[in-house]
């Protein structure tokens, strides 16, 4: 057996992988997953238990037949059954048991126990009041489907019909569960990613003509970090120039050149500036460090909207989350001042110091939307578009959805016409949607659908459930790409999927 030199294995450790013959030796295809020596006995015991519960009497046949289950066990580790855990409520245990029974013929035992583990963590954090267990069983099934990269992938509509619940209830519970379990899901995703990275990294064998070689480049998601780094520098320059009078563009250019080439010691930062710097550091961080930096910023200067934005995004209690978001808006308005807001309405985003306040309003609008407080959400989104008609935040996309959900089709249509984005999936497919909702399956609707399909042909498969929207959405996309289709379908799923007539029209136009 050949082990690649750049993947050393700890003595006493244990590995799992597929062996392929290569002349006189065996090598792993495409790689293997290894665990440290300290976990060997526990893993061996777990695999033996899987073997005893299987119908296979031959160990070799078992390893071949149950390889996916063994692979799951290596990646996710052992998790207890529902009956072995302590529950806050008998109803919570009931959901876990129903989930186990339902999933028995769908996924292997390791994945079922993973679902039970996630439900247990959700119960400990949220302590949900279970009125209808089937809603949570369906939500767990959908969560597992989206998380496992080779899952069964049943659509929300199909699950809602199977469990006789509304798709909106399932969707709401899923969003909540995904938010509450963010830490656990991130950790599990990292395990999956690490396993995949190891396999991809080792999918190259120098001098072995038997293998096709493919390079997998890892794309770093540096967009958010670079965006805040740029904002930090823009804010610094804005602060430097705020008390200076420039008569000509040459004066401004000369000043900027001096700033770039300046070697002297910079003036000390105020507490407000120090606090905002901590916030930018927090946006570059995750988990506890992110919270700690936000709290540290508030101690330096209490009127920092972004500090409350960060604390709100990690708050699980909806009442406390709303209080934090309202506080963010309040201190943002206090810092900017009513006169400033009134005088600069129309080009807010161009003034860097307004952005924390704008983020606060957008986050609050999103919170109101998620909690189906549509009228309040509409006011916030409309305010954002008045302050910044260029809409660098994308408030118009969310506002369109709330308009439709509220039955305000004329306003939704006017919004589409105002921004006239016929070259995007958002613009093209939403024109179809509005025409259908207002006038039915007209010739105009058919023509608009043909144009939308030309713009992005991938959208229909996701709206019709032929392809499933992945749990983790693309971070970037190009116009007309499948990534754009996924993002559109995810944002507008409820608008289309909740209306059978709309789906029938799409099927006929496919």
Image: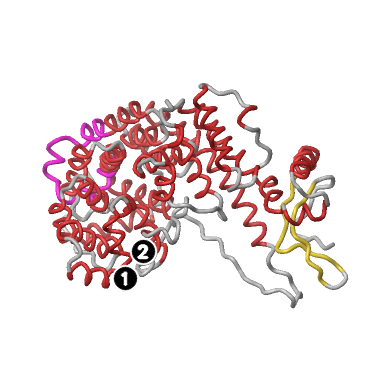
In percent of width and height, residue 99 lies at 54, 37
**Residue placed most toward the observer, 28 or 110:** 110
137 vs 274, left or right, is right
Image point (37%, 33%), residue name: 312
In percent of width and height, residue 114 lies at 60, 40
Residue contact at pointers 2 and 1, CB within 8 angstroms? yes
Disc 2: CA contacts within 10 A as few (<14), some (14-19) or many (>=20) = many
Q: Which mark is residue 453?
A: 1
Quarter residue 187 falls in: top right
The vertical placement of 31 against 265, above or below, is below
The magenta stretch is 329-356
Image point (30%, 69%), residue name: 509
In percent of width and height, residue 417 lies at 15, 61
Q: Which residue is disc 2 drawn over?
A: 459
Q: Does the magenta segment cover residue 75?
A: no
Image point (53%, 43%), residue name: 186
Name the dominant secondary structure of the magenta segment.
helix
Q: In the structure shown, which secondary structural element does the residue marked by tag 1 occupy? A: helix
Q: Does the magenta segment cover residue 344?
A: yes
The N terminus appears in which quarter of the rendering?
Answer: bottom right
Task: Specify which label sits upstream in the sequence, 2 or 1.
Answer: 1
Task: Report, in whole angstroms, how far the alpha carbon at label 2 lies from the one at label 1.
Answer: 8 Å
The C terminus appears in which quarter of the rendering?
Answer: bottom left
**Residue placed most toward the observer, 439 or 145:** 439
Image point (13%, 57%), residue name: 414
Q: Which mark is residue 358?
A: none
In percent of width and height, residue 299 lies at 38, 26
Disc 1: CA contacts within 10 A as few (<14), some (14-19) or many (>=20) = some
Q: How is the image coloured?
A: secondary structure
The vertical placement of 391 against 201, above or below, is above
Q: Residue furthest bottom?
A: 209
């Amino acid at each position: 057996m050949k082990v690649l030199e750049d993947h050393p294995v700890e003595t006493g450790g244990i590995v799992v992988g597929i062996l392929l013959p290569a002349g006189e030796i065996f090598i792993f295809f495409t790689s293997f997953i290894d665990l440290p020596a300290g976990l060997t006995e526990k893993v061996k015991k777990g695999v033996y238990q899987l073997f005893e519960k299987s119908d296979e009497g031959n160990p070799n046949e078992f390893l071949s037949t149950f390889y996916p289950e063994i692979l799951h066990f290596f990646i996710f580790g052992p998790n207890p059954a529902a009956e072995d855990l302590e529950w806050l409520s008998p109803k919570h245990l009931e959901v876990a048991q129903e989930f186990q029974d339902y999933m028995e013929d769908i996924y292997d035992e390791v994945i079922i126990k993973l679902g039970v583990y996630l439900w247990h963590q959700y119960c400990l954090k949220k302590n949900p009041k279970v009125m209808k267990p089937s809603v949570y069983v369906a939500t767990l099934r959908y969560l597992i489907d989206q998380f496992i990269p080779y899952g069964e992938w049943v659509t929300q509509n199909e699950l809602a019909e199977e469990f006789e619940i509304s798709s909106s209830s399932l969707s709401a519970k899923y969003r909540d569960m995904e938010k509450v379990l963010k830490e656990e899901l991130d950790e599990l995703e990292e395990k999956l990613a690490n396993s995949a990275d190891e396999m991809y990294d080792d999918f190259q064998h120098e001098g072995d003509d038997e293998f096709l070689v493919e390079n997998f480049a890892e794309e770093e998601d540096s967009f958010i970090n670079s965006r805040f780094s740029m904002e930090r520098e823009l804010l610094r320059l804005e602060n430097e120039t705020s008390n200076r009078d420039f008569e000509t563009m040459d004066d401004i250019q000369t000043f900027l050149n001096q700033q770039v080439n300046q070697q002297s010691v910079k003036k000390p930062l105020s507490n407000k500036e120090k606090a905002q710097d901590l916030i930018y550091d927090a946006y570059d961080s995750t988990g506890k460090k992110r919270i700690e930096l936000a709290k540290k910023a508030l101690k330096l200067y209490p009127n920092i909207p972004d500090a409350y934005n960060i604390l709100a995004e990690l708050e699980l209690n909806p009442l406390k989350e709303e209080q934090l978001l309202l506080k963010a808006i309040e201190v943002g308005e206090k810092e900017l001042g009513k006169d400033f807001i009134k005088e600069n309405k129309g080009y807010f985003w161009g003034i860097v110091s307004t952005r924390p306040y704008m983020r606060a309003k957008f986050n609050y609008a999103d919170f109101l939307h998620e909690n189906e407080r549509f009228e309040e959400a509409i006011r916030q989104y409309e305010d954002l578009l008045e302050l910044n008609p260029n809409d660098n935040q994308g408030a118009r996309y969310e506002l369109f959805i709330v308009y439709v959900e509220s039955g305000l089709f004329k306003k939704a249509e006017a919004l589409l016409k105002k921004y006239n984005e016929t070259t995007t999936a958002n613009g093209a497919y939403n024109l179809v949607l509005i025409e259908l909702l207002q006038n039915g399956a007209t010739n105009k609707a058919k023509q608009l659908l043909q144009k939308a399909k030309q713009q992005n042909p991938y959208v229909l498969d996701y709206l019709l459930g032929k392809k499933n929207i992945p749990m983790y959405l693309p971070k970037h996309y190009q116009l007309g790409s499948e990534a754009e289709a996924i993002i559109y379908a995810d944002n507008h799923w409820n608008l289309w999927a909740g209306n059978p007539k709309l789906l029938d029209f799409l099927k006929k136009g496919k």
